[in-house]
């Protein structure tokens, strides 16, 4: 169900929106959803650029029925060197479903980003992503597991595991508030170049080194969030505070420019959505 614009954040953001919307109304006919969203700290599994960018992304969603959807979000980045810059557009095609009396929720989606060649976002190397998640829903706690394939110059595989619990309150005027405290773990392969000192017979050859491509599977981040949606009629207000803890950052000795940047970070995503 879950997360520069972090695809972890995007998938989680869409999934909780869908669940809340499913709770409040089920519209099997084709309809359009438009939203405007702001993220205070753009990150990719806790990885960030050196400028600590925030982002604004309007989003247009077309729902052909209650299962099949497509959407597109142009991303505008703001930081201390660039006040407002278009970084690219992320498009998604997805299919969601409920099964076995709505005790299971599945989401299959394909993501195709179109980043500018000079985009400074950490995930701008991503060319495409395919992902699937399955959640078991119950009154106590929802359990989610997922997997994905990411295509850049190479191919990486990822897995997701998480738990959440939805609190839903309907008011006298038929407005609804949904709060969904969530905890997720993200892991996957990472491919990087590792330098090794060349060795001769028994002794290393000082000053000489070679390199090799390394693929490593590791935990990428832990993320704790509280997605919150207030819905009244065709209008939704969304607020998601989150705390991300990046893990296993790739650090290259003597080359901070090639090392991954990231630290434990609190950030928030705010949005307003209109369902037409």
Image (cartoon, helix red, strand yellow):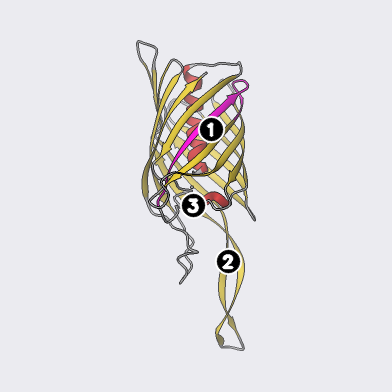
Residue at the disc numbered 1: 135
**Pointer 1 and pointer 2: residues touching (CB < 8 Å)?**
no
Where does the image place residue 134, in percent across and percent down from the top left?
57, 34
The residue lying toward the viewer, choosing from 118 and 197, is: 118
Q: Nearer the viewer, mark 3 or mark 2?
A: 2
**Pointer 3 and pointer 1: residues touching (CB < 8 Å)?**
no
SS at mark 3 in the image: strand
Q: Nearer the viewer, mark 1 or mark 2?
A: 2
Mark 2 crowd level (few <14, some 14–19, many ≥20, 10 Å Cα): few
The residue lying toward the viewer, choosing from 274 and 82, is: 82
SS at mark 2 in the image: strand
Q: CA distance from mark 3 to mark 1?
A: 21 Å
**Pointer 3 and pointer 2: residues touching (CB < 8 Å)?**
no
Image point (41%, 29%), residue name:
238
Mark 1 crowd level (few <14, some 14–19, many ≥20, 10 Å Cα): many
Q: Mark 3 or mark 2: which comes first in sequence?
A: 2
Q: What is the magenta range?
A: 52-70
Image point (49%, 61%), residue name:
250
Residue at the disc numbered 2: 193
Residue 50 placement: quadrant? bottom left
The residue lying toward the viewer, choosing from 137 and 23, is: 23
Q: Which mark is residue 220?
A: 3
Could one spot residue 56 in this view of the protein?
A: yes
Where does the image place residue 91, in percent across and percent down from the top left?
59, 37
Q: Is residue 10 left or right of residue 231?
A: right
Q: Nearer the viewer, mark 3 or mark 1?
A: 3
Image point (61%, 87%), residue name:
200
Q: Is residue 228 above or below residue 159?
A: above
Q: Mark 1 or mark 2: which comes first in sequence?
A: 1
Could one spot residue 2 in this view of the protein?
A: no
Q: Is residue 152 above or below residue 5?
A: below
Q: Is residue 250 left or right of residue 176?
A: right
């Amino acid at each position: 169900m879950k997360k520069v614009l972090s695809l972890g954040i995007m998938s989680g953001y869409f999934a909780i929106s869908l669940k809340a919307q499913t709770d409040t109304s089920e519209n099997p006919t084709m309809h359009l959803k438009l939203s405007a969203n702001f993220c205070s700290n753009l990150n990719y599994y806790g990885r960030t650029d050196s400028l600590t960018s925030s982002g604004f992304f309007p989003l247009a969603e077309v729902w052909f029925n209650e299962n099949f959807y497509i959407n597109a979000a142009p991303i505008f980045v703001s930081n201390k060197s660039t006040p407002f810059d278009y970084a690219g557009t992320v498009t998604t095609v997805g299919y969601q479903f409920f099964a076995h009396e709505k005790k299971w929720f599945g989401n299959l989606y394909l993501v195709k980003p179109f980043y500018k060649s000079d985009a400074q976002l950490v995930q701008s190397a991503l060319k495409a992503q395919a992902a699937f998640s399955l959640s078991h829903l119950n009154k106590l706690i929802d359990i989610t597991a997922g997997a994905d394939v990411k295509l850049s110059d190479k191919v990486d595989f990822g897995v997701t595991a998480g738990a959440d619990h939805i609190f839903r309150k309907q008011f006298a005027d038929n407005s609804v508030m949904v709060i969904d405290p969530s905890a997720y773990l993200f892991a996957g392969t990472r491919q990087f170049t590792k330098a090794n000192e060349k060795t001769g017979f028994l002794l290393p050859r000082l000053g000489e080194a070679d390199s090799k491509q390394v693929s490593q599977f590791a935990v990428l981040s832990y993320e704790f969030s509280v997605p919150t949606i207030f819905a009244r009629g065709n209008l939704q207000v969304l607020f998601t505070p989150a705390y991300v803890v990046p893990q296993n950052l790739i650090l290259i000795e003597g080359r901070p420019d090639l090392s991954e940047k990231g630290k434990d970070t609190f950030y928030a995503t705010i949005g307003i959505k209109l369902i037409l």
